[in-house]
Amino acid sequence: MNNHHRLTTEYLGLQLANPFVPSASPMTRDADMPKRLEDAGASAIVMHSLFEEELKNQHEQLHQFIHHQDIGHFEADSFLPWPEQMDNIKDARDNYLEILHHLKKQLDIPVIASLNGISMDGWVEHGREIEQAGADALELNIYYIAANASETAHQVEQRYIDILKALKAVVNLPISVKISSQHSAPVHFVSQLKQNGASGVVLFNRFFVPDINLDTLNIEPQLHYSSSLESLLRIRWVAIIKGQVDIDLGVTGGIHSANDSIKAILAGADVTHMCSALLMHGAKHISMIREDFIAWMDKKEYQSVIQMKGSLSQQYAIDPVAFERANYLEVIDSYSRSTEIIK
Ligand SMILES: Cc1cc2nc3c(=O)[nH]c(=O)nc-3n(C[C@H](O)[C@H](O)[C@H](O)COP(=O)(O)O)c2cc1C
């Protein structure tokens, strides 16, 4: 088998040349980064998200602009556009569709669009226009922090399912749902998503965690790039879900090297997404990962990604409980035996 075919994988009904797919990020807002990613070997690309808030704020912003112009608000001149720039205030949706059109023209690889929100306020209906604009699939990111004491785990899950069903009602595209790692019964939840029409799940959203500034005592949002270690949480859950729910699996979070990607595929992933690694090292990082991936396959005599997929999932692992609690004591024990406690 030549190297080209050895890496093929199927995800959301798409035949992909390899499992390396840049995840949603500002990279798709850039004029030439998507083409560079394709040239470096990306097999598909996930667009930055169209956010529920953007769709809702649009009308408010336009209203504010018109209002400030009417009353000749002096200070507003410094931060509001000049009247001739009015045309440049594009509807967030139009802007998104324009970028999608452009990507479809510019690239040969599939383009997966992304919708991001948390409510049932009608924003998912924009999925229809995204489908008409030529997206090959849709990722639905429900970036929801369950921070309400009166909301049950069941209600949180139902929120995801209701939004998914509303989106399914308006599009025929395959949909993957990008979920949080903070669900109390993730395998059951993923099976519910499957039953309600999800073709895939992407594990996991990486929430931006605010920090406390000890000088100003302000709560500050912060964005750190991930590291490889974060992939292990995803890999565990992919391995557990693989044999139990027949759904496509994407890993996002902590995929920085060929080794990270290989582990995720062995656990059962269909694709491995990358964001931080590409923002840190640029598009060419994909070609390096591709080479290292093939070198490992040669060393271990794997013929194809299809052969690798799930071969170390919980279902097939020699030690299936290793993915669960069973080795908990063993790990603590071996730590106690091998590590001297600093006193
Ligand atoms: C600057 C930046 C922008 C992002 N924008 C989006 C977005 O628009 N939609 C989305 O679903 N995820 C977004 N993400 C999350 C990434 O797609 C990815 O899931 C996350 O960074 C974990 O992967 P990584 O460890 O490879 O970075 C963004 C991440 C970063 C760092």
Image: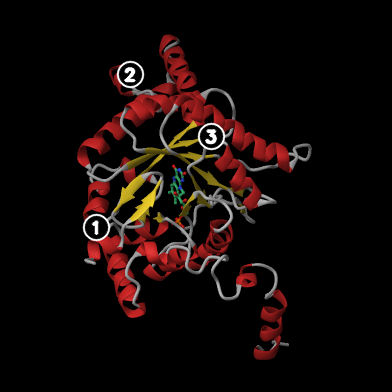
Q: Is residue 217 at all visible to an observer of this figure?
A: no
- Type of amino acid under label 3: Gly
In screen coordinates, is 2 left or right of 110?
Answer: left
Considering depth in this image, is 116 or 295 the residue closer to the camera?
Answer: 295
Asked whether the residues under the numbered discs 2 and 1 touch, taking CB atoms below 8 Å apart as contact, a structural biologist would say: no
Q: Quadrant of residue 137?
A: top left
Does residue 253 appear anywhere in the picture? yes
**Mark 2 to mark 3: distance in Å?**
27 Å
Q: Which residue is mark 1?
A: 40
Disc number at residue 53?
Answer: none
Cα–Cα span, label 1 and label 3? 31 Å
x and y percent of residue 110 in the render?
A: 30, 43
Between residues 235 and 5, which one lies in front from this camera angle? 5
Left or right: 60 in relation to 19: right
Q: Amino acid at mark 2?
A: Met
Q: What is the crowding at mark 1: few (fewer than 14 residues within 10 Å), some, or many (at least 20)? A: some
Q: Which residue is mark 3?
A: 117
Mark 3 lies on a secondary structure that is: loop
User: Which of the image's four quarters has the N terminus?
Assistant: bottom left
Residue count near mark 3 (Cα–Cα under 10 Å), binned few <14, some 14–19, many ≥20:
many
Report the amino acid beneath label 1.
Ala
**Label 2 environment density (alpha carbons within 10 Å; few <14, some 14–19, many ≥20):** few
Give percent across and percent down for residue 93. Answer: 39, 26
First in sequence, mark 1 or 3: give its number. Answer: 1
- Which residue: 56% across, 75% down? 318
> Dot 2 corresponds to which residue?
86
